[in-house]
Amino acid sequence: MTADHYFTARPASDGELRRVPVRLAGREVEVVTAGGIFSPDGVDKGTRVLLAEAPPPPSEGTFLDLGCGWGPLALTMALTSPSATVHAVDVNERALDLCRRNAVALGCTGVVAGTPDAVPSDARFDLIWSNPPIRVGKAVLHDMLGTWLPRLAPGGGSAAYLVVQKNLGADSLQTWLQQTLPGLMGPVEVTRQASSKGFRVLRVRRD
């Protein structure tokens, strides 16, 4: 798997679409996926861990799914909290197209899928969920997290939940977040929310 996996892909043609049954927000639904994106066969193990271990989203607010893929996290947020606005962000145009298709099919009118530069610069997030693309390398990963995590809404109570495979550097990432984020966003608490099936769920919470 290379960085190109995340950064270059054209939208899938109708003939390339796969219809996949999945369970999101406690219900059985059907989504469309395609090759050339992350986890085209369904909800990957790391995302399942995050969904099982993170607390339910608030009933309303502005949320972010960072690295949305075909949309399992964004769709879960929107199905759970229909009044919320959910920004689904990815650099892969094929993934974004699939996420939009799935949001429309499931009636998730609050999902706004787009590239990072499509998100309003003044948007602040009450909740961030992410299964970040670890394999793009530390420099890209750190730049991404250092850009988006400081956009948690001020005032306390906003939080981000990141799922990272233990053997791909979850603990070193936690240390980096603890050392780096205070200089970018002020007082912040970085803790391990859960450890399950070889993954860590890290919580970043504004103090």
Image (cartoon, rainbow, N blue to C red):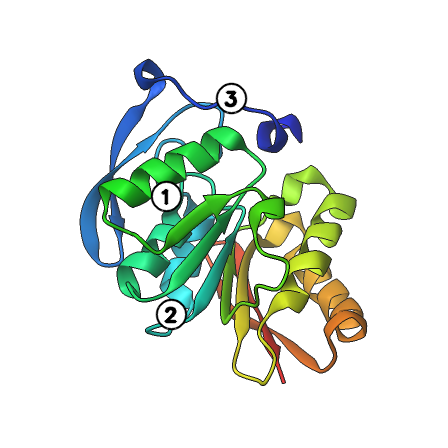
Horizontal side of residue 172 vs 95, given as left or right: right
Residue 134 location, x and y as percent? 64, 45
Vertical side of 28 occupied by 91: above or below: above
Residue 204 location, quadrant: bottom right
Mark 2: few, some, or many residues within 10 Å (few <14, many ≥20)?
A: some
The answer to which of marks 1 and 3 sits earlier in the sequence is: 3
**Residue sitting nearer the eye, 93 or 56:** 93
Q: Nearer the viewer, residue 121 or 200?
A: 121
Q: Residue at x 58, y 49 (%)?
A: 132
State the residue position of label 3: 10
Tell me the distance, in whole angstroms, between the alpha carbons under discs 2 and 3: 32 Å
Q: CA distance from mark 1 to mark 3?
A: 21 Å
For residue 137, side relative to residue 35 (left or right): right
Q: Secondary structure at mark 2?
A: loop
Q: Which residue is mark 1?
A: 43
Q: Nearer the viewer, residue 18 or 60?
A: 60
Disc tally is 3
Task: Give the residue drawn at x 37%, y 74%.
Answer: 58
Frontmost of labels 1 and 3 is: 3
Image quarter hosting the N terminus: top right
